[in-house]
Amino acid sequence: MDAEFDSSFFIGAMLDCLNGFSSVFILAFGLYIVYGLFKVINMAHGEMVMLGAYVASVSQESGYPFIVAVLCAGLSGGIIAFAMDWLCIRRLPERSSMSSLLATWGFGLIIAQGVRLYFGSAGRFVNPPVSGRIDIFGVPLPTYQAILFAVSLILLLQSWWLLGRTQLGLRIRASIDNPSLAELNGINTQRLFVLSFVVGGAFSGMAGALLAPISAIDPTVGTANSVTSFLVVITGGVGQIFSVLFGSVVVGGLRSLINSFWGITTATLGMLAIVAIILVFRRRSALLND
């Protein structure tokens, strides 16, 4: 009995780890496209995720299927991102400067206050598209959690293929590494940036819709979403898509795993300590390489 109990507990902890990883990966993926690739600090990312959750809630209440609600949330995120770029980002002298941080932060405040004025402060809910559970070696796993894990893997593999195996990915990487040289070779770096910024915003909106059935929806969750997403991207580092994979494993997976054994407070503190150690060693490695 003890061995069976220990085995079930261990499998449950591993499943919690996978759930934490997949949720955080989906949450941070839109920010990775904008900040991880183009180094633009989008402080409105969390609010765009929150807005996507609200759009999904309204769409579901209107009788639309869940997949339509997700697409509507992605459309709203893409529109907000395009408006943010057209009104603010492209008019700044340096996209990666402090001015972009302040501009996107102001946009985030506008989104949060607009949602609060229109919907009020009360929380909302989104029903998952599927119910039931899957037995994994005798341990039940909600079917929707399994779907989120599959979605995270699809995003990871498709992004790796797009950035590393396509002509568009080659142009994006060239624009990131040396924008001036890319322009001389006929690559419209501004158009690529706008496309990436809008796609990142669309993924932020869809993340809000996908995570809405398992998370809170209210006007205050934007800040928490932003903090978690930035932790993932900063921990993983910028550049390759597998960087955000590593960050998601540390921030989401390890925190969920530690939580299974010692509780959420210890898990959060432990995760932050691990993140700090990673950043210290990365900084030392960079100094040694210089």
Image: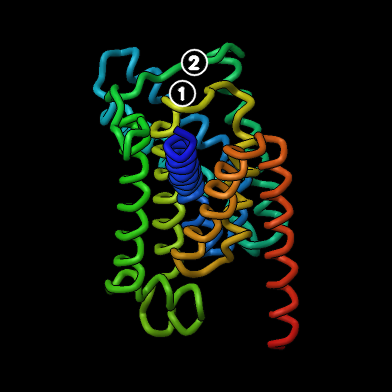
Badge number at residue 54 = 1
Question: Which amino acid type is shown beneath numbered disc 2?
Answer: Arg
Drawn side of residue 145 relative to residue 249, left or right: left
In the foreground, 231 or 190: 231
Report x, y in % for residue 91.
59, 56
The total number of labels drawn is 2
Residue that badge 2 annotates: 124
Residue 201, can we see it? no
Vertical comparison of 283 with 287: above or below: above
Report x, y in % for residue 190.
45, 65
Report x, y in % for residue 182.
43, 80
Question: Which amino acid type is shown beneath numbered disc 1?
Answer: Tyr
The answer to whether marks 1 and 2 mark residues whose Cβ atoms lie closer than 8 Å is yes
Number of other residues with Cα within 10 Å of mark 2, as a class: few under 14, some 14 to 19, many 20 or more: some
Mark found first going from the N terminus, 1 or 2: 1
Number of other residues with Cα within 10 Å of mark 1, as a class: few under 14, some 14 to 19, many 20 or more: many
Report x, y in % for residue 244.
50, 59
| On-image quarter of the N terminus | top left
